[in-house]
């Protein structure tokens, strides 16, 4: 590759490019449809409603769920987590979380502690792996749920959500999973894994636009949730009280229809291309990069087996300023990464990279071997200085 080319390796923040056809589908809605949903008695409104329902059904297929009406659209996974956490837990409730949670979980929980909710962090080892043997002893009589990311956004290490789901079922706990880093890449089956709520975002592995996300929730858990927002839904307009019907109960106001159209297209792409194929390509590129970076001047953060992590290579440049390295990778070599604490300070404390953070390279199946080899070459140049 020629130097000063552009290589995008910030896919854990948001994927680029999006799935083929997504931009065109968003544009098509804005230019040729443009109407609202659930609020018009005309053909375009009906066809829009069909796209929205089809998108809910495709998400059910992807995530092993059987209730399209229980797929709730939100702005993103952060809003989804806020709605689930703040809508359910109250003074006296105790939660367990992993030590690797993003601030999308931590900040709502910290707010909830002001109202009498408590939580404990299940410890993880220096590679970010969950210490499952500790969980039993951490239970209290008032423990109500486990909240957990599926994969660390800092180092990619996967959490054993199937095992944790069985643990929650055995102990009568709710299980809430944040799949921001794995949706569209790793298989998730809500029913088999005993998930009560799965919070997702569209703009990462689902390859959809920013501004669309949501959660899938079981009937029993939905009954325990108080809606965080209320307003018009286009249904039960004779009432000034919240509807009980899902998804209306949790979808007040006009939804992001351009985003849903884009998500519909990206889900179609994922179905045809295959998430197993995507994951295998990403793991191959990730393993290639990790095996090419074994210098003593570097610390690879997290597990070194690409099959046990999302497609992230997180590096601590020993003896150098990580922020300066990230700046040089971009300014001199056109390599786009993310440096810092990645909105997950306790993850870095667990991994031993606080406060300096890491330089995170997050890979997509749209990346190539040529690009990965170029990145490795540029890192070696910086290390040689």
Image (cartoon, rainbow, N blue to C red):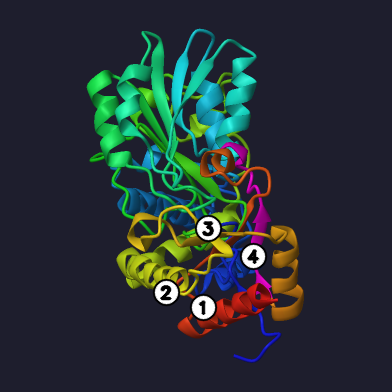
Cα–Cα gap, marks 4 and 3: 15 Å
In this view of the protein, which residue sits in the foreground, 236 or 281? 281
Tell me which numbered mark, 4 or 3, is placed earlier along the sequence: 3
Q: Which mark is residue 337?
A: 4
Tell me which numbered mark, 1 or 4, is placed earlier along the sequence: 4
Mark 1 or mark 3: which is in front? 1
Would you say the residues marked 4 and 3 are in contact, meaning their CB atoms lie under 8 Å apart? Answer: no
Q: Which residues are magenta?
A: 335-346
Lateral position of residue 235 relative to residue 307, left or right: right
Q: Tell me what residue is drawn at x 43 percent, y 57 percent.
A: 310
In the image, residue 179 sits, relative to residue 70, either above or below, namely below
Q: Tell me what residue is drawn at x 60 percent, y 19 percent.
A: 112
Q: Disc 3 marks which residue? A: 204
Mark 4 or mark 2: which is in front? 2
Quarter where residue 27 is shown: bottom right
In this view of the protein, which residue sits in the foreground, 117 or 297? 297
Q: Is residue 252 magenta?
A: no
Would you say the residues marked 2 and 1 are in contact, meaning their CB atoms lie under 8 Å apart? Answer: yes
Which element is circle 3 on? Answer: loop
Q: Disc 1 marks which residue? A: 372
Tell me which numbered mark, 4 or 2, is placed earlier along the sequence: 2
């Amino acid at each position: 590759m020629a130097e000063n080319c552009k290589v995008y390796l910030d896919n854990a923040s948001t994927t680029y490019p999006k799935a083929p056809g997504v931009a065109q589908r968003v544009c098509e809605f804005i230019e040729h449809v443009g109407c609202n949903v659930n609020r018009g008695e005309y053909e375009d409104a009906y066809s829009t409603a069909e796209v929205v329902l089809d998108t809910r059904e495709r998400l059910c297929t992807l995530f092993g769920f059987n209730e399209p009406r229980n797929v709730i659209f939100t702005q993103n996974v952060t809003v989804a987590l806020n709605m689930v956490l703040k809508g359910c837990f109250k003074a006296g409730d105790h939660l367990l979380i992993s030590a690797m949670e993003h601030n999308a979980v931590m900040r709502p929980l910290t707010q909830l502690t002001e109202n009498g909710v408590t939580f404990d962090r299940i410890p993880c080892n220096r590679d970010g792996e969950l210490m499952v043997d500790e969980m039993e002893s951490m239970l209290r009589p008032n423990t109500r749920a486990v909240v957990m990311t599926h994969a660390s956004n800092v180092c990619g290490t996967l959490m054993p959500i199937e095992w944790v789901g069985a643990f929650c079922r055995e102990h009568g706990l709710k299980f809430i999973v944040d799949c921001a880093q794995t949706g569209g890449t790793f298989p998730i089956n809500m029913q088999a894994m005993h998930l009560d709520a799965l919070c997702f975002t569209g703009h990462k592995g689902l390859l959809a636009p920013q501004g669309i996300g949501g959660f899938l929730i079981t009937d029993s858990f939905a009954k325990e949730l108080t809606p965080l927002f209320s307003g018009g839904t286009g249904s039960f307009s004779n009432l000034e009280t919240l509807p009980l019907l899902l998804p209306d109960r949790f979808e007040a106001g006009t939804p992001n229809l351009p985003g849903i159209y884009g998500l519909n297209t990206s889900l179609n792409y994922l179905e045809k291309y295959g998430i197993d194929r995507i994951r295998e390509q990403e793991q191959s590129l990730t393993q290639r990069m990790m095996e090419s970076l074994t210098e003593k001047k570097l610390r690879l953060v997290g597990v070194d087996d690409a099959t046990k992590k999302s497609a992230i290579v997180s590096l601590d440049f020993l003896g150098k300023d990580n922020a300066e390295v990230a700046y040089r990778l971009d300014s001199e070599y056109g390599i786009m990464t993310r440096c810092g604490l990645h909105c997950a300070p306790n993850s870095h404390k667990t991994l031993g990279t606080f406060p300096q953070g890491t330089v995170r390279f997050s890979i997509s199946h749209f990346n190539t071997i040529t690009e990965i080899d170029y990145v490795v070459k540029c890192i070696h140049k910086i290390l040689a200085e």
